[in-house]
Each structure stands twice: as C-alpha cells, then as structure tokens.
Amino acid sequence: MAKFTLYYGNKNYSSWSMRGWLALRLSGVDFDEVGFHLGEEGVREKILEHSPSARVPALRHGDLVIWDSLAIAEYLAERFPEVPMWPTDPNHRAVARSAVAEMHSGFPALRANMPFNVRRSSPGKGSGEGVRDDIERVQQIWRDCRAAYGRDGSFLFARWCLADVFFAPVVSRFRTYAVDVDEVSRAYCKTVWEQTHVREWRAAAEAEPWIEAEYDL
C-alpha cells in the first residue's frame, strides 16, 4: 500500500492540523509527517507544493492529495472500515457527523477571539462578541451527546471517535483561556486532554521552539 504523508503546520498553533493528525492516529495507519513553520517567510509557496489550497493539513496517499481535515477524516474512515472511527450505529453516526460538520464550519467568534495555542495560559483573555454564545453551543453539543450516546464511556459517543477528534482543539482552547464550563463539559475536557494521542500532540507542541506573535495573546 502507498505511503501516507501528512503535511501540517506548527503543532502549537494549528488546530486543523491537530484534527488531521489525530484522525490518522485513530485510523492506526503508519504515516510520515512533514511540518511547516507557519511564520516562516515563503511558507505559503512551500505548502503550495503539497497542497493545492496552500493550507494545511493535507494528506498525500500515493498520487492522491486530500487538503481538508474533514475530507481526510472521511477518507480514512472509508479506507479502514474495520476501525470504528465513527459510531457503528447509523443513527449515532448521523448525529456524530452533524456535530463534526457544525464544528468544521461554525463557531467563528470562538476561533477569532481564542487563537489555538497549546502552550499558552491566558485566563480571562479571548472575550468578544459572540464568544460566549459559541461556548454555550459547544457545551450543549457535549451535554446532549454524552447524555444520549456516551453514557457507557468517557467520550461523546462512548469510545474515542472522530467527533472527539474534531472537538479536541476546542478542549485545548478552553484550557488556554480558562473558560468556565459546566460539570459535564469539565469532565469531558479532562478525559480528552489525557487521551493518549492528544498527549502525544501536546508534548510535540510544547517542544516546538517557534513563537508566533499573532497567536500569543
């Protein structure tokens, strides 16, 4: 089988790269990693050699290039159907996909005002119009999924799956800015933060030497 290669941005700053990387780790496939320092001069041109959108993450599998985190996740789920990357129940899977799609396209205030930064601790920062509404909506998704589908485990749909992968960077944001969350969300954040693959990403992010001023509030 052709090699998988993931092209990604700084692990400390690139939330979408984190999602692509976690999806690959969930799939269990071996893959190579090629990282880009997003603050480096000329980095767009370098990424463009591997990603037609000049954005990361991008996944190469043989001659195929997939340049979106959700498309990467869906491709891996199709390639490795023996791995339960989505919930196995079709109704649960539909809800999980809805939650992931909302995460993929929504929450603009949260993204804009709380830049992803694994290393940083900025309690009290990141406020802005619409941020609290986004935070409340995230918590509602977590509460609803945990109550309806996750009672038999610690994650949104009992076992670690792509829904958790896509919300993992939000957990990191909530920790960076010390967001006040409800009891269910607090327990979920703790579980995700200590998940094996998330811990691996965190360790790599903390070891990176680069500092990007625009992301360090």
Image (cartoon, grey):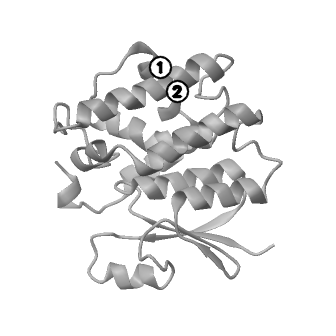
Q: Are marks 2 and 1 in contact (CB under 8 Å)?
A: yes
Residue at screen point 75% across, 36% down: 90
| Residue at x 47% of width, y 58% of height | 17
Q: Position of residue 144 (x, y in %)?
A: 53, 21
In the image, 35 versus 59, the foreground residue is 59
| Residue 198 makes an appearance in the image | no
Q: Quadrant of residue 30?
A: bottom right
Q: Position of residue 106 (x, y in %)?
A: 39, 46
Identified at 70% across, 44% down, the residue is 85
Using the image, determine if residue 162 lies above or below residue 42: above
Q: Which residue is mark 1?
A: 187
Can see residue 54?
yes
Q: Nearer the viewer, residue 135 or 22?
A: 135
Where 70 sits versus 191, above or below? Answer: below
- Amino acid type, residue under disc 2 in the picture: Thr
| SS label for mark 2 | helix
State the quadrant of the N terminus: bottom right
Mark 1 residue element: helix
Q: Which residue is mark 2?
A: 191
Determine crowd level at label 1: few under 14, some 14-19, many 20+ residues with C-alpha closer than 10 A.
Answer: some
Residue 158 on image: x %, y %: 66, 26
Q: Quadrant of residue 135?
A: top left
Measure the C-alpha gap from mark 2 to mark 1: 6 Å
Name the amino acid, label 1: Ala
Q: In the figure, is residue 162 to the left or right of 112?
A: right
Q: Write the residue at 35% across / 45% down.
A: 118
Q: Is residue 24 left or right of residue 135?
A: right
Label 2 CA crowd tier, 10 Å (few <14, some 14–19, many 20+): some
